[in-house]
Amino acid sequence: MIDLAAPVPVPGTAARAWRDDTDAGRVWACADGPRWTVGADGGPEASLVLYRHGTGPVEGGSATIGVDLALTAAERA
């Protein structure tokens, strides 16, 4: 289990880490904050859907963005 009272410094990265409360060799880590999820094209994953009746004006919509807290390969190393 994560021991929030035992943070582990991770200098030079945008990551946070904590020791495990029962296994001294285990560390739990995540990104310091949410990051855009990157799609296959290398751009952020986002979509916008607009709603209208027929050819009338836009009456509403929804926006979706993807974010994650995963570490980068450099941060895991």
Image (spheres, rainbow, N blue to C red):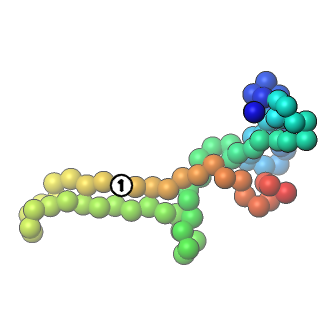
Q: Percent position (x, y) of residue 11?
A: 84, 44
Q: Residue at x 83, y 35 (%)?
A: 19
Q: Of all residues shown, which one is farthest toward the top?
A: 5
Q: Of all residues shown, which one is farthest toward the front?
A: 22
| Callout 1 crowding tier (Cα within 10 Å): few <14, some 14–19, many ≥20 | few
Residue located beneath label 1 in the image: 63
Count of marks, rendered view: 1
Drawn side of residue 39 relative to residue 17, left or right: left
Kindly indicate the quadrant of the structure image that contains residue 38. Answer: bottom right
Kindly indicate the quadrant of the structure image that contains residue 41. Answer: bottom right
Q: Residue at x 77, y 61 (%)?
A: 73
Drawn side of residue 35 relative to residue 9, left or right: left
Q: Residue at x 39, y 62 (%)?
A: 47
Q: Secondary structure at mark 1?
A: strand
Q: Of all residues shown, which one is farthest toward the right?
A: 25
Q: Residue at x 75, y 44 (%)?
A: 29
Q: Percent position (x, y) of residue 77?
A: 85, 57
Q: Percent position (x, y) of residue 23?
A: 87, 36
Q: Of all residues shown, which one is farthest toward the bottom?
A: 41
Kindly indicate the quadrant of the structure image that contains residue 26. Answer: top right
Q: Percent position (x, y) of residue 2?
A: 75, 33
> Looking at the rendering, in which quadrant would you find the N terminus?
top right
Drawn side of residue 29 relative to residue 9, left or right: left
Disc 1 marks which amino acid?
Ala
